[in-house]
Image: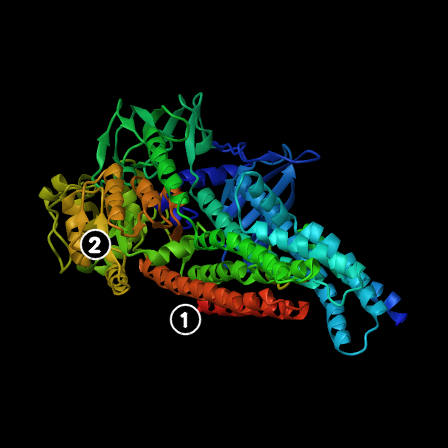
Amino acid sequence: MRGSGPASARPRASGDPALDARLRGHERGGVSAAENLDLSLYAKPGPDGTCGMELAVEGIACGACINRIESAVRRLPGVTEARLNFTNRRLRVSWTDGALEPARILAALEDNGYHGHPFVPLRAEQEEAAEQRRLTRCMAVAGFAAMNIMLMSVSVWSGNVTDITPATRDFFHWASALIALPAAAYAGRPFFGSAWRALRSGHLNMDVPISLGVILALGMSLVETANHAREAYFDSAIMLLFFLLVGRTLDHAMRRKTRAVAGNLAALRADTAHRFSGDELVSVPVAAVAAGDRLLVKPGERVPADGVVQSGHSEIDESLITGETARRNVAAGATVYAGSMNYSGTLTLKATAAGGSAVIDEIERLLEKAASAKSRAMRLADRASRVYAPVVHATAAMTLLGWWLAGASLHDAVVTAIAVLIITCPCALALAIPAVQVVASGALFRANIILNAGDAIERLAEADTVIFDKTGTLTLPEPRVVNAAVIDAELLQNAARLALSSRHPLAMALSREAVQRVPYDGAIEEPGQGVCVMIDGVEARLGSAAFCSALQQSPLIPAQAGIQRWVPAFAGTSGEQAGISYIYFSYGTQGAVIEIAQKLRPDAVETVAALRAHGLSPMILSGDRSEAVGPVARALGIENWRSALKPADKIALIEDLKRKGRRVLMVGDGLNDAPALAVAHVSLSPISAADLTQAQADAVFLGERLAPVADAVAVARRARRLMMENLWLAAIYNMIAVPVAIAGAVTPLIAALAMSGSSLLVTLNALRARGA
Amino acid sequence: MNVLVYLVPMALGLGLAGLFGFLWALKSGQYSDVDGAALRVLSDDDIEPRDHTS
């Protein structure tokens, strides 16, 4: 509902005139004099005349928030239900159609200090939720069946060495069959379906030996039971299904969790645009903007769609698109691109593209190409199982043939071959990777890293080169005050508190310094000039040099250290010198020139050193000018840096590194970085990145610190080591078990012990990924 | 051993009851917000209604 970027980064109930007007409007009954918020895009009609909407809620800290949010929303007239899902931070609201303006829900949340972001749940996300439920049901059925069959199998095993009567044993076997057959028919469907699809398209996948093993084991056991045999393999087949389903459910749960986080991120970043309908201004979600719409862009907001400026003039910052930090002046007739930050003036523009952008489309095209290249890289487990399946089949066939040729009866040869199939079925292998992934993603989450791609851990561990973008990645996403040390502390606090009342980007940067985050009463903003207020009867002004010096009758005399004299020459250099912008503050006879510029992330130097210690060689590839990149590179001690690069140049450089056999970890936030992120072996983005960039990154890190980048590499390396250990454990298990099975010495008891033993071992080993 | 004829079906019946209980809980969405459920139980709004919002 507000511009993205600095404004939405922190809760601020007032100091935002447009929002305040809207909130006041809602209090008057949902009709705002200033502007309506049109959320009809998100409201979905439900059954029996209700309307529903889902919102991602920002600012939830503890359990008390659940009650506070739900009761605030339920109190609105017309609301029939409000339920907050604390796990994925989503609120679902239903109301009687027509009884409630959906915008009032957002206003109610704002009143309580939360931000609500409506969104349309992705289709893929819903499908994954359904798949997750299906897998969990299958796992429950398999688990139930495995326990009950095992109960009877243990009786048979102990009976076989004591004095069980054949009639009792048959009864137990038939009862096991009664449970096993329906359970396998139900719980085995994910495997049978996938195996069938693979076979039909002429492939072999891991599900083929699994399905074959389960079906043959059940069939054989049925025949054996009918023949009053001593042993049946119902327990092995069902236990196998159960362990495999546990592995699959874990794997799926992790992917779904990362998907939900990514969905929330997208909703948090979704902006609204101010659209003229007639003379009236309506806020609409950016997705609803169509080509030809007339839009209003206020200072401090991002341009919602590509367009041509019709009236107004302003400075715009295109760093998110190009990486260039110098601002561009635009006036009527100029073309602006979606994602640019509007700095100083209000612009009216005519959209030339629907809620997206030609530049973004071009970048998306590059992305698609890069993403398809990446999907060709096979996953570790896939590679392992691709080799595994034919070997399993061959071994089983050889066993059958060998025993038969050696003179065993066909019956014995088949039984032995099936035992080989069962014992080699990779339940430990199936758990080896997902269990580590789940534990490691938890460890990453605690280190403030959210995974977007499930297999990112493996790729992160392989990285040997780290490439940083500069703007917003090595530096903080928003500019900061850089000369705070030389300004009188009290004066700076006054200035920062006054800055809370302005939406100008420079003022927002200054307002971050404020300790007391309460705006002054009665502050007046002169658009394009600055803000002024009376503090203790003395007028304070913050803004352009002209606006502040209008108050001064004579040039300022430095009354004490740190208070600077007005230097007229400064006015001319504003925003030009090495990316520093100036904002002026006057308070009575005191005054200060506050310098605002991009600042390095607080721990950038240590993080780069830590990455070096991990054996990664750092590089900077920036779209910014070399005068801006050079100092940053020197500060971090990175010799390898390039500036003024276009997205295609970055891709070319990364491709070049890849040809040299380097595995590149790309860390970037701008739209111009998105294709480079997709091309790189693995990629990270800060949470402040553009949506498209975030969607492309393998993982997103939170907060102001750069340390998560080094942590991610450390956790991923430990996780990869554990994955390899687990694969080896599974392999060693097979090396021991397979010869025993080929020799025909595997009884159902041995199979059960071996399977559960190896599964338990890899799961316990995976828990070590939590590590220090 | 005749006792097994009704003991085993009984055991199965009990097991099935547990299984259907789980499936019902899954279907009614009790596993969709496990963190929230743990915190909701601590909310005392039904004991002393208090206005948190003003």
Mark 1 or mark 2: whose residue is earlier in sequence: 2
User: Residue A572, relative to residue A227: is it above or below?
Assistant: above
User: Residue A291, relative to residue A427: is it above or below?
Assistant: above
Q: How many marks?
A: 2
In the image, taking residue A495 as reference, residue A733 lies left or right, namely: right
Q: Position of residue B7 (x, y in %)?
A: 85, 68
Of badges 1 and 2, the one in the foreground is: 1
- Residue that numbered label 2 is attached to: A482
The reply to whether discs 1 and 2 touch (Cβ–Cβ < 8 Å) is no
Of the 4 image quadrants, the one containing the N terminus of chain A is: top left
Q: Position of residue A490 (x, y in %)?
A: 25, 59
Q: Which class describes the residues within 10 Å of circle 2: few (<14), some (14-19), or many (20+)?
A: some
Query: What number is the disc on residue A502?
Result: none
Task: Report if residue A121 is visible in the image.
Answer: no
Q: Amino acid at mark 2?
A: Val
> Which image quarter: residue A362?
top left
Q: The residue tagged with tag 2: helix, strand or loop? A: loop
Residue found at the very far right of the displayed protein: B2
Q: Position of residue A139 (x, y in %)?
A: 65, 56
In this orientation, which residue lies closer to the viewer: A714 or A315? A714
Of the 4 image quadrants, the one containing the C terminus of chain A is: bottom left
Badge 2 sits on which subunit?
A
- Residue that numbered label 1 is attached to: A772
In this orientation, which residue lies closer to the viewer: A746 or A646? A746
Who's the residue at 25% across and 26% down the image?
A: A331
In this orientation, which residue lies closer to the viewer: A324 or A73? A324
User: Residue A289, relative to residue A478: is it above or below?
Assistant: above
Who's the residue at 48% across and 40% down the image?
A: A23
> Which image quarter: residue A321?
top left
> Which image quarter: residue A651?
top left
Q: The residue tagged with tag 1: helix, strand or loop? A: loop
Badge 1 sits on which subunit?
A
